[in-house]
Amino acid sequence: MNIDTTKDAAKLEVNGKTLVMDTIRGVENEQAINSLNLRKETGYINLDPGYGNTGSCVSGVTFLDGEKGVIHHRGYELKELAANCNFLEVAYLLMNGELPNTAEYKQWNSQISENSYLGPSLQILLNHYPSRSHPMSVLASVVLSLNGFYGDLGEERFYQLDMDVVRLIAKTPLIAAHDYRRKRGMQYIPSDPTLGYAENFLHSMFGVNLSPERRKIMADSLEKLLIIHADHEQNCSTSTVRMISSSDANVYAAIGGGIGALWGPLHGGANEAVIKMLEYIQMHDGDLASVIKRAKDKNDPFKLMGFGHRVYKTYDPRATIAKSVVDDLLEKLGVDEPLVDTAMELEKIALEDDYFVSRNLYPNVDFYTGIAYKAMGIPKEMFTVMFTMGRMAGWLAHLLEFREDEHRRICRPRQIYAGSPMRDFVPLDKR
Ligand code: ACO
């Protein structure tokens, strides 16, 4: 990995002990103190709930500058990738470090095509989930179950990793599309190898109910949305994937866990929550003021969904791309979506309000993406599934990187214990 180490550049004095540590500088000048020996040398641990100051790894996949609003993958700025690539090219870049050349792309694309099917047993399994199951719950459990269909039973742990990667990228859209259809009493639609990745998903989901012309328009937008979802360095779900992988669990177990982490409304689940919030505002005659008031009220757990980010202290560059995708999509589809106006008004009010300004709270990636998915006819409860389809590439890229990491250890944080001190046991009849 491309990092500079300065020997003995940091000194920590605690309780009469001095620990001298190396500092580390990444290629974009991010800095860290190597505290690997902190506990061994001083007896102290670093307490950092939420890991806001904790670097869990050295990674070469994605760089973020949250102050300047910069994101690049393997050196390529996200907006350039979104403007010029399709999702499979970006997925290849994340996992392999370089954009594919024509031959590499052709091979990658045909691997995905060849694995874009759900076999009869997988369809039967999927059909048996309760029809009221949330699509994220179905997706997470079916992905975990893939180990039963394709897993290596733990004997040769890393032997078939490349095929696991291909299967997960190829089958996730089909699992999502078939879950949508079977809940509505509709048959499975096999994928069409002549269509691109996003278009195939729309075809497998809507079949003949979507004209090829509209499907093409939507697919162009969807490719961009999948790209902006594809990776975001050590976020909650990616860290979960790394954490699970650190126990040498299989790929499907790690990715299933990542899907669970993404589902939460503070993370990828925010796109569903944003639309619910905007619809709530609409139902209440555009009452933006009460939503803003609630978001600022410290006694109210409500937050302005799609706003704020642990890393970004400025406008999330993904939100800028998402907004332009929404505008373009609505124009090309000829759809008038009043939620866009509600979202823009809400954004304007928040960005002029001292509460949000002083805390650097700006729209994040989830603020506008749901509007695009709504315009495509994708139901709200599937919005986070759409996010998952994109983020699958990033999770797998990090998993592959982690498996090759010479410093890889089981992820096992420590704690400060605050419960009862050791005490005498009292038998049941004496309690
Ligand atoms: N609405 C109102 N207040 C907020 C919001 C919000 N959306 N986000 C942060 N704040 C406030 C906090 O209450 C806190 O106020 P305080 O300093 O008075 O205590 C301050 O801003 C700092 O926020 P933190 O909670 O420290 O921010 P953190 O980095 O822990 O959380 C998070 C980031 C979870 C994204 C948060 O901003 C949030 O809950 N946003 C809404 C949910 C959301 O949109 N999530 C998607 C994020 S993007 C992604 O994961 C794909």
Image: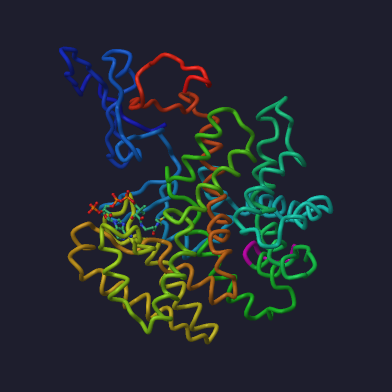
The residue most toward the front is 429
Left or right placement of residue 155 versus residue 247 in this view: right
Above/below status of 105 relative to 12: below
Q: Position of residue 332 (x, y in %)?
A: 52, 83
The residue most toward the right is 120
Left or right placement of residue 296 versus residue 403 in this view: left
What secondary structure is the stretch in magenta mostly built from?
loop
**Ligand 1 picture quarter:** bottom left
Image point (42%, 46%), residue name:
235
Above/below status of 278 relative to 1: below
- The residue range painted magenta reads 193-198
Left or right placement of residue 151 versus residue 124 in this view: left
Q: Position of residue 386 (x, y in %)?
A: 56, 61
Q: Position of residue 65 (x, y in %)?
A: 31, 49
Q: How many marks?
A: 0
Above/below status of 317 relative to 245: below
Q: Position of residue 390 (x, y in %)?
A: 55, 56
Image point (70%, 59%), residue name:
174
